Amino acid sequence: MKQEKDILIIGGGPIGIACALECKKRNLDYVVLEKGALTNSLFNYPLNMSFFSTSEKLEIDHIPFISTNPKPNRNEALEYYRRVATSNTLAINLYEEVLSITKASDVFLVNSNKQEYRAKKVVIATGFYDLPKLLNVPGEDLPKVSHYYKEAHPYTLQNVIIVGASNSAVDAALEIWQKGGHVTMVVRGEAIGERVKYWVRPNIINRIKEGSIKAYFNSEISEIKDQEVIIKTPDGTEKINNDFVLALTGYQPNFSFIKNANIKFTEDERHLPIYNEVSMETNIEGLYLAGVICGGKETHKWFIENSRIHAERIANHINQTLTE
Ligand SMILES: Cc1cc2nc3c(=O)[nH]c(=O)nc-3n(C[C@H](O)[C@H](O)[C@H](O)COP(=O)(O)OP(=O)(O)OC[C@H]3O[C@@H](n4cnc5c(N)ncnc54)[C@H](O)[C@@H]3O)c2cc1C
């Protein structure tokens, strides 16, 4: 039997939870469908990561986020969003993945891996952390290659290549080096990323200068083999011994999921979904986007700090249109 709901919120990340809070405040009939654990992306972050935002900037619905650190860490954020969700008894179905969204006249038919829903409005807040940007080189599917980094311990005394030069890559490089791993960074550009946290950037630059961490700039991996990796550098091809590759080159939204819902995108390489900036409604009436997914391929554009406002905009618009 089909479940009937006024509003389906897809994704139980910080912004999906913020949307649920705003719906609850307005007594709207909603449910959040989350394919993994609560705040699944944050759950999968490196164990020792800290946010670049202060805790107040990660708060939703003005609920205080108390941290004793200048920047909160993953565990504190998990604790915060969990307490917000549970103490407000938000309606959230975990481990329920949405597979498709179809609009039939003025109702949405939504299929999950567990059941079918009919909904008047749908909010997509699915983030971008599930799909890594691939290197597309031979050997990328070897078990020693990962696109996610969790903690340093497995890499102690190992030859580790880290691909990328953004926050994730730099944090992993420093942590693994501190725990006794032999780290080589392979960086496509000519320097460590400009957006790397300002208090971390000098550290990595100095470790590279002193030779503690080796880095190849303007370089790319061309092949990954069981015990070595081939790197194309400006000075020719290098073959280096290798035990593990961490390809931390970023992530991207699930474009086919949103395309299948008939949401339109800009036709340039940014692939920005088209939506109304006041209501967050897409070209499909009643279908909204919230959170970091709004940035398309520009995944640095939206984050919790500046996208938490989407929740209120969407709930206001839904409230107004449901009662018209
Ligand atoms: C390492 C790292 C550090 C960061 N630090 C900061 C920071 O300091 N400050 C800041 O503001 N931002 C930061 N960000 C960005 C921000 O934390 C994340 O992008 C944030 O999680 C975005 O929230 P969201 O709710 O839009 O998306 P997400 O948190 O990614 O939530 C999306 C949810 O949707 C679920 N989902 C996906 N597809 C489906 C489906 N088909 N069906 C059901 N559920 C689905 C996912 O499992 C996930 O739980 C950081 C990001 C990273 C990667």
Image (cartoon, rainbow, N blue to C red):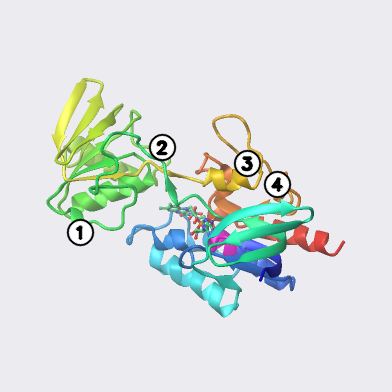
User: Disc 4 vs disc 3: Cβ atoms closer than 8 Å?
Assistant: yes
Circle 4 or circle 1, nearest the eye = 4
231 on left or right of 311? left
Label 4 crowd (10 A; few <14 / some 14-19 / many >=20): many
* Residue drawn at point x = 27 percent, y = 29 percent: 222
Identity of the amino acid at label 3? Pro
Identity of the amino acid at label 2? Glu
Q: In what quadrant of the picture does the C terminus appear?
A: bottom right
In the picture of the structure, the residue carrying the numbered disc 1 is 153
* Most foreground residue, 109 or 165: 109
Within 8 Å: ligand 1 and the Cβ of disc 1?
Answer: no
Identity of the amino acid at label 1? His
Q: Secondary structure at mark 3?
A: loop
Q: Which circle's residue, 2 or 3, is located before the other in the chain?
A: 2
Region rendered in magenta = 10-17
Circle 2 or circle 3, nearest the eye = 3
Label 3 crowd (10 A; few <14 / some 14-19 / many >=20): many
Distance between the Cα atoms at labels 2 and 3?
A: 26 Å
Q: Which circle's residue, 4 or 2, is located before the other in the chain?
A: 2
Within 8 Å: ligand 1 and the Cβ of disc 2?
Answer: no
In the picture of the structure, the residue carrying the numbered disc 2 is 194
In the picture of the structure, the residue carrying the numbered disc 3 is 273
